[in-house]
Structures are given as C-alpha cells and as structure tokens.
Image: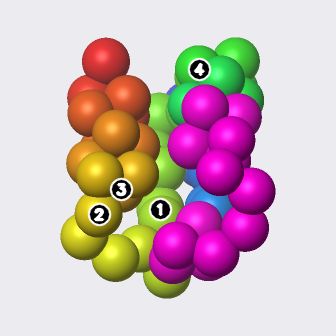
Amino acid sequence: MHMRVVTLNVWNTEGDSRRPVIINRELHQLDPDLIAFQEVVQTRVSECLTASAKV
C-alpha cells in the first residue's frame, strides 16, 4: 500500500498574495492522500485551502 503525504507551511498571512492560488494548483497536481498544514490562521485564505483539500 502506498500513501502520498504532503506537509505545507502556509506562513500564516505572510507572503505573495497569489500564494493560495499557487498552493491550490500544486496540491491538485500532487493529488495527495493526506495534507498536513502548518502555521495556518483562520482567514479567507485558509478557508479556500481547506475547501480545496476537500475536493
């Protein structure tokens, strides 16, 4: 059995404003079985990332 695991430090609200779009695109390409986010705060960005992970 193989499992693809991805960990990602989203840097809270720091960095490039395009970051959520780039993260979503890359996560869809990787198609992981499990994603572990680090340094996430409750913002619209984190809600978008969470919604993307549920697809």
Placement of 37 over or under 20, stated as above or below: below
Say which element carries label 4. Answer: helix
Whether residue 48 is in magenta: the answer is no
Label 3 vs label 1, nearer the camera: 3
Label 2 vs label 3, nearer the camera: 2
Say which amino acid is labelled 1: Ala
Tell me which numbered mark, 3 or 4, is placed earlier along the sequence.
Answer: 4
Label 3 vs label 4, nearer the camera: 3
Classed neighbour count for the residue bearing mark 3: other residues with Cα under 10 Å, few (<14), some (14–19), many (≥20)? some
Label number found at residue 7: none
Say which element carries label 3. Answer: helix
Q: 19 or 54: which is nearer to us? A: 19
**Cα–Cα span, label 2 and label 1:** 17 Å
Say which amino acid is labelled 4: His
Q: Which residue is mark 3?
A: 46
Say which element carries label 2. Answer: loop
Q: Which residue is mark 2?
A: 43
Say which amino acid is labelled 3: Ser
Q: Which residue is mark 1?
A: 36
Q: Which residue is mark 4?
A: 28
Q: Quadrant of residue 10?
A: bottom right
Q: Quadrant of residue 53?
A: top left
The span picked out in magenta is 9-23
Tell me which numbered mark, 3 or 1, is placed earlier along the sequence.
Answer: 1
Q: What is the x, y in percent for residue 4?
A: 62, 38
Q: Are marks 2 and 3 in contact (CB under 8 Å)?
A: yes
Placement of 24 over or under 47, stated as above or below: above
Whether residue 18 is in magenta: the answer is yes
**Cα–Cα span, label 3 and label 1:** 13 Å
Side of 31 where 36 appears, left or right: left
**Cα–Cα span, label 4 and label 1:** 14 Å
